[in-house]
Amino acid sequence: MPLTVRMLAFGGARDAVGSGQVDLPVPSPCTAADLLASVCQRYPGLGAHRTLLRLAVNGRYAAPGDPVAAGDEVALIPPVAGG
């Protein structure tokens, strides 16, 4: 049964997705790794950066095995540099 999450995309991820915010159906059950794979498949422009993207679920960085549930807010965070 599919679930829907609100996905926020920043920086280059936003460019690849074409929007800063998308309501995204994902399979249930779902982990952060499952979600990232699904998003990269849906938005092929993200594929080249997949290993560099961080995923946050409800404001916290997620490990690959962390669960993602219906209604969660998920953020795609590209690498950042500062100085």
Image: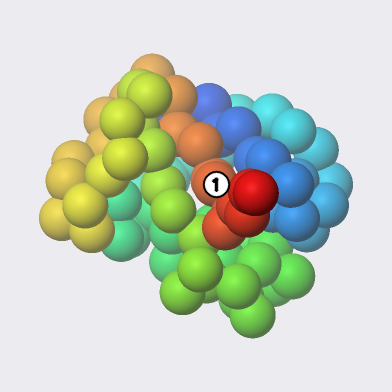
Q: Residue at x 69, y 72 (%)?
A: 44
Residue 26 visible somewhere in the drawing: yes
Find residue 11 and report its horizontal and vertical position in percent.
74, 47
Q: Residue at x 74, y 70 (%)?
A: 45
User: Which secondary structure, mark 1?
Assistant: strand
Per the image, the residue denoted by label 1 is 77
Which residue is nearer to you in this view: 76 or 37?
A: 76
The correct choice, above or below, for 38 with respect to 66 in the image is: below
The correct choice, above or below, for 72 with respect to 77 in the image is: above
Which residue reaches farthest top?
71
Task: Answer few, some or many: residues within 10 Å of disc 1's Cα (few below 14, many 20 plus, some between 14 and 19).
Answer: some
Residue 1 visible somewhere in the drawing: no
Toward which corner of the image does residue 72 lie, by quadrant? top left
The correct choice, above or below, for 38 with respect to 80 in the image is: below
Q: Residue at x 31, y 30 (%)?
A: 60
Find residue 25 and report its horizontal and vertical position in percent.
50, 40
Which residue is nearer to you in this view: 32 or 27?
A: 32
Find residue 54 and report its horizontal and vertical position in percent.
44, 53
Amino acid found under the numbered disc labelled 1: Ile
